Amino acid sequence: MSVLSPFAQCLKVVALLAGVLLAACQPAPENGVAKRAVLVQAALPAAGNGAVLTGEVRARHEVDLAFRVGGKILRRFVDVGQSVRAAEVLAELDPADLQLAASAAAAQRAAAESDLATASAERQRYADLLAKKFVSQAAFDARDNAYNAAQARLTQARSQSQLSANQAAYGVLTSGFPAVVSSVLADAGQVVAAGQPVLRVARPEEKEVLVAVPESRLAEVRAAPEFVVHLWVDPQTALRGQLRELASVADAQTRTYAARIRLIDPPPTVSLGMTARVSLAGAAGSGVLVPLAAVGNSGQGSFVWVEKAGRLQRRSVQVTAFRDDGAVLGEGLAVGEQVAIAGINLLSEGLEIEARLAPEPAAQR
């Protein structure tokens, strides 16, 4: 056994002390486990084997608003999605040219009024002279005709002045009814012609769902007496709908037929632009619908991971059907419960997670 020299022993002691100091400087490990972010999605009511169509809540009445005169847009006061009141100013044109035209028309009216006053005085003088036989009838008739022409010019000037004043007022764009701005078609600085659409507004009183119907479902949709509508924002609530309009010509690009499903007594929470699922009223089935990726099978039956109070619970379920839009569960899960839809084979019972809502199904495709 070799004996270390005093110098080597000192180096060994210094190394041990350095290790102790470094260990003391390290932060103490946390007792808790870091939360894992997991995508979750609410279970939806499952429709039967009938048509299930996805659409958008739209207003029945949409109107394109335009200026009644041409000009350069000076300001736009509203944006898409903004609610507007009746007679509220939405946009305005540069008023310089319109005000100049109105001033010119007012000046022409004043000149016509002055000409009429002169012609009236001349006619009265010639009438007095004619009564005294100082002028001929022809001379009086000439002054009478001049007076009548001056009256006609004044009427024309007044009409033109009123028209120019109206056109000056047409430089302000307003809505004649309460509405929601659904599209902006022109912006400030753009020169528009009279009648060119600037804004598209929708009247929110009557709401309906616009869906695209494939050719194979036309007869089914046309014969349906009623529809069931579920909003993605509130899948637990079922709304009633009726077919109001079905296009007779297919879209040239998608080869589908546009259909409008009128919502019957929708609640005030239904807003324009919301996404909805439309199914036949008689095709509603039992069970719930979850994404295919949410269902796992470990050899002992199907299961899903359910999020409860920030933790995962393994739930055994019975799968009744696999469809293009997801898996239909006959029992084991309730509508509205949040299920994990990604990485289910890496999860464990009781795992504390940070639940993150998955994007809407349309955005996942």
Image (cartoon, rainbow, N blue to C red):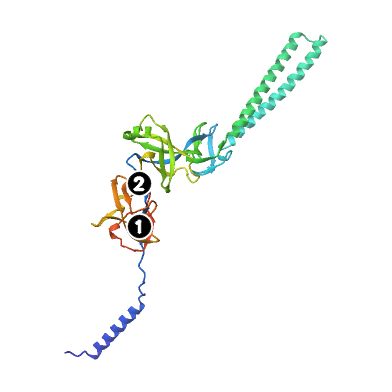
Image point 61% across, 30% down: which residue? 164
Q: How crowded is mark 2: few (under 14 residues within 10 Å), some or many (20 or more)?
A: some
Q: Which residue lies furthest to the left in this view?
A: 1
Indicate the secondary structure of the residue bearing disc 2.
strand
Q: In which quarter of the image is residue 9?
A: bottom left
Amino acid type, callout 1: Val
According to the picture, the residue beneath numbered tag 1 turns out to be 306
Number of on-image labels: 2
Residue 168 in the image: state x and y as whole percent.
Answer: 60, 33
Image point 72% across, 24% down: which residue? 114
Amino acid type, callout 2: Ser
Left or right: 238 as drawn, with respect to 289: right
Indicate the secondary structure of the residue bearing disc 1.
strand
Left or right: 134 as drawn, with respect to 80: right
Residue 165 in the image: state x and y as whole percent.
Answer: 63, 31
According to the picture, the residue beneath numbered tag 2 turns out to be 286
Residue toward you, 139 or 9: 9
Question: CA gap, disc 1 to disc 2?
Answer: 20 Å
Judge whether residue 63 can be spotted in this image. yes
Q: Earlier in the sequence, mark 1 or mark 2?
A: 2
